[in-house]
Amino acid sequence: MKKIELSPDNKAVALRATKDIRFAASYLEDLIKRNDLLEDMQGIMPCNIEHYVVDLFKAIGHSSETEKKIKERHAAIKKANMRIHELEKQMGEQGDIDIVPHILADLSDKIRSFWKKDGFGHVSEIHFTNYGHCNIKFSGMLFPDHQMIGSETPESDKISSAKWIQNLKDRGFKLVKESEQSRREEYVIDNDHNRVLIIDLITKRFPSVTVMGFENHVRYRSKNIFTISDIKVFIRILADI
């Protein structure tokens, strides 16, 4: 019988899926044994396992009626959720206060998407004030592997991560490794040059923003090199987001 040769990406996804299935099934088993299975978990856990099974089937190239039915059901759920979102939007236009959380969640997603694409990958904090402003703490640490979480191409993404770091350097950012043994640069040096680039990046995206300050951490004490840990900003007009 012929052996199946999986690509590095498909192999990584398949192994990840089998691990997720084992963990989810074991956790569900423990809940059942302890009689701790709550109503919300009754639906969430099996749904999670189904997702992992679909990922596994896809990775190993197996097509089944089970996968087809799962996809059809989730497509129906997605369609229903889109309809709910549309109704909530209509209610919001009529002044319904329940739409506010959805608006804030959408604004938060846009902020995070910006920092993942053009910044350093992770947003530490987002707070909306009572007066319609927004306080944000952008992480100054580098998170090149953020796109690998749940990815279907984890091995290829390792190459993309290296390109992501190189892109920052090409744009002029001065980076430093945690140690001489480190595989790649992991931190942004805290100096006037990098601060100017960061302020320019953020203000171009959010015109009403004020960069309130930088937090740093000593990386090489012997060389007196500090790296940026966080950037605190204040957005005055939410429409800028």
Image: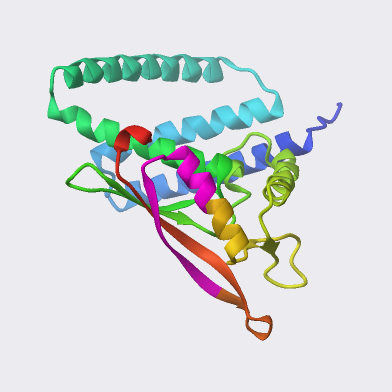
Quick one: quadrant of the N terminus?
Answer: top right
Magenta-colored span: 199-217
Q: Is residue 59 above or below residue 217?
A: above
Tell which of 20 and 149 is nearer to you: 149
Can the viewer see residue 45? no
With 234 as the anchor, is 144 left or right in this view? right
Please name the colour scheme applied to the rendered image. Answer: rainbow
Give the residue at x 54% y 15%. 68
Tell which of 163 and 239 is nearer to you: 239
Q: Is residue 140 above or below residue 67?
A: below
> Quadrant of the rendered structure where residue 91 is?
top left
Can the viewer see residue 96? yes
Quick one: quadrant of the C terminus?
Answer: top left
Tell which of 136 and 7 is nearer to you: 136
Give the residue at x 72% y 72%. 179
With 165 as the anchor, is 65 left or right in this view? left
Residue 165 location (% of width, % of height): 69, 50
Give the residue at x 47% y 38%. 205
Residue 83 location (% of width, % of height): 30, 14
Q: Is residue 30 above or below residue 188?
A: above
Residue 4 location (% of width, % of height): 81, 30
> Quadrant of the rendered structure where residue 219 is?
bottom right
Residue sitting farthest toward the bottom = 222
